[in-house]
Image (spheres, helix red, strand yellow):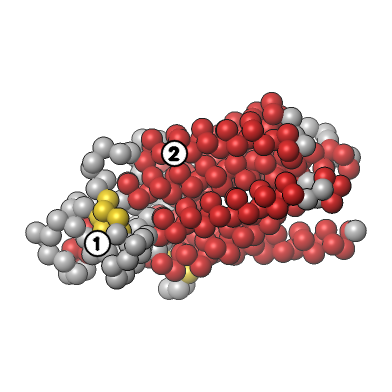
Amino acid sequence: MWMSDPFSGVSQSMLVGLGVWVAFGYLWTFAPRFGVARDYAVASFGVGGVGGVLGARVMWWFSQGLERGDGFFSRELLQEVINPMRAGYSSLGFLAGAGLVIWMLDRRSGAGAEAGAETRGRLLDVVVLAGLLGMVFARFGCVFNGCDFGRVSGVGVFSVRYARGSLAWQRHVSEGLIGGEQLWSLPTHGFALYSAGATLGIVAMVSLWSWRREADRRSGGEAAKWAIAAFCIAQFALEFLREPANGGTLAQQLNINQIALMGVFMFLGVRHIVDIAQK
């Protein structure tokens, strides 16, 4: 069992920063394997990071607007959104924002020919895998920060108990599951640990699959497509183990993250059908 104390001094920002450097290392090391120049990959990743931060903030604002009873434009919520040092960011929003910015900028570069499209696809391959690898460390940060905790569970290797004053502890006290004198929350599913492990496995498997294929048999964008599809499926299933109040419930069964994941997966499915029809 893991014991997490958000007030111990290990900050989520430290692990997020480490994740950025790990993602940068992946880009620098493996971009040539994907047929992408290092400077092109790193520059695109940096610009995409700006869009990622904005996307993370927007999706967090949207999920909080659904969850809270006072709506999207309450004074308190808007103050939290405007202040970058307050409240939270959505990891799914970051990936969506970064991907959208990179795609838009590359489309405007004028590289509309087949060779240009192939280059864009290979760039997307390496950037998506690097971004997912960086998110693994952000998920570990969630464990130390006490956010994105799971539902109450039995004691197990990957279950997590959070210290007094944490979000999980506060929720368990408010629901009458533990008393205010308790020092730790009840055991919870290690949602962030599950997500980190699944994402790391996806990055490893797709990277190895991509590298082992002959260059003329792997079209640009293929690795990114399979990595995103696998991530959507895994994360959709894992969301059922997350404490519902963290993600904002929608239609009583699915949270906003699951709705977004379904949308991305359906989009990938349509694009895959279109690609097959065009060949």
Quarter of the image with the N terminus is: bottom left
Query: Which residue type carries mark 2?
Result: Val
Quarter of the image with the C terminus is: bottom right
Query: Which x, y percent locates residue 246?
Result: 37, 59
Query: Which x, y percent locates residue 53?
Result: 51, 39
Q: Residue at x 82, y 45 (%)?
A: 215
Identify the residue under disc 2. 16
Camera-side residue of 213 and 145? 213
Residue 171, label in figure: 1
Q: Earlier in the sequence, mark 1 or mark 2?
A: 2
Tell which residue pokes out farthest to the front in this image: 212
Give the quadrant of residue 103: top right
Q: Residue at x 44, y 59 (%)?
A: 194
Dots 1, 2 in contact, CB < 8 A: no
Query: Which residue type carries mark 1?
Result: Arg
Give the quadrant of residue 188: bottom left
Q: Is 174 drawn above or below residue 166 in the view shown?
A: below
How many numbered dots are placed on residues in this image? 2
Q: Is 150 drawn above or below residue 122 in the view shown?
A: below
Query: Which x, y percent locates residue 163?
Result: 21, 52
Q: Is residue 106 visible?
A: no
Q: Is residue 131 visible?
A: yes
Query: Which x, y percent locates residue 259?
Result: 54, 64
Tell which residue pokes out farthest to the left in this image: 181
